[in-house]
Amino acid sequence: MWYMSASTPKERLLNAVVESALTDGIADKSLRAIAAAAGTSHRMLIHHFGSKEGLLVEVIRAVEARQRALFAQARVDPSGSLEDLGRAFWSHLRDPALAPQERLFFEVYGQALQGREWAKPLLPGVVDDWIGPLTALFAALGESPATARVDARLAVAVTRGLLLDVLATGNAADTDAAMERFSQLLASQLTG
């Protein structure tokens, strides 16, 4: 499911690095170790991504794109409730296999917010790329476009905040309960 078709050597290489990152993490690995795990050389990674830092940004972007594609596939089921969709997607995001990538996301996101030049390319779209699909979902459920957009931003912020919370505290039970409560409140707003 994680594999996405790739037509260029750079895309194929990125897919291989993403697969390695999702399996074993990459933030604490050298560029040579990342290259070896992806079946390439560090020179090819530098050629295509400029640096380890540039590669990290591209890996995060690729994983985020995959998450949005997975979300789009999940929301196609017209018989499912918004709460069910929220639970299923939260369960997916809480998969321990994604934790290394989520830590990497927050690490690089923080570096971008600190103004680190290498990390700044992560910022365009990091929120808005999620706002569009969520706004469309909420509007399809009957919200006005303006309210749907506000609720979409709220959903992104709450989800990321709770992911950061569980990564920082390890308190899965309370963060899961908080997400359940948020999903209930949002669903009641949309169906109320």
Image (cartoon, rainbow, N blue to C red):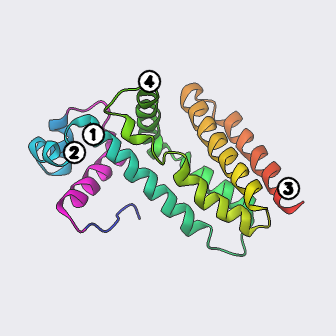
Residue at 75% x, 50% y: name it: 183
SS of the residue under disc 3? helix
Between the C-alphas of marks 2 and 1, the distance is: 5 Å
Q: Residues within 10 Å of mark 2 (few under 14, many from 20)?
A: some
Which amino acid type corresponds to the residue marked 2 in the rendered image? Phe
* Mark 2 / mark 3, whichever is N-terminal: 2
- Quadrant of the snapshot with the N terminus: bottom left
Residue corresponding to mark 1: 54
Report the mark closest to the observer, 1 or 3: 1
- Quadrant of the snapshot with the C terminus: bottom right
Q: Are marks 2 and 1 in contact (CB under 8 Å)?
A: yes
In this picture, residue 150 sits left or right of residue 129: right
Between the C-alphas of marks 3 and 4, the distance is: 38 Å
Residue bounds of the magenta highlight: 7-30
Between the C-alphas of marks 2 and 3, the distance is: 45 Å
Percent across and percent down for residue 181 are 78, 44
Residue corresponding to mark 4: 114
Between the C-alphas of marks 1 and 4, the distance is: 16 Å
* Mark 3 / mark 4, whichever is N-terminal: 4
Magenta portion: prevailing SS class? helix
Residue 49 tag number: 2
Is 24 colored magenta in this rendering? Answer: yes
Between the C-alphas of marks 1 and 3, the distance is: 42 Å
* Mark 2 / mark 1, whichever is N-terminal: 2
Q: Are marks 1 and 4 in contact (CB under 8 Å)?
A: no
Is 189 colored magenta in this rendering? Answer: no
Percent across and percent down for residue 176 are 68, 41
Which amino acid type corresponds to the residue marked 4 in the rendered image? Gln
Percent across and percent down for residue 179 are 71, 43
Residue 188 tag number: 3
In this picture, residue 81 sits left or right of residue 162: right
Q: Are marks 2 and 3 in contact (CB under 8 Å)?
A: no
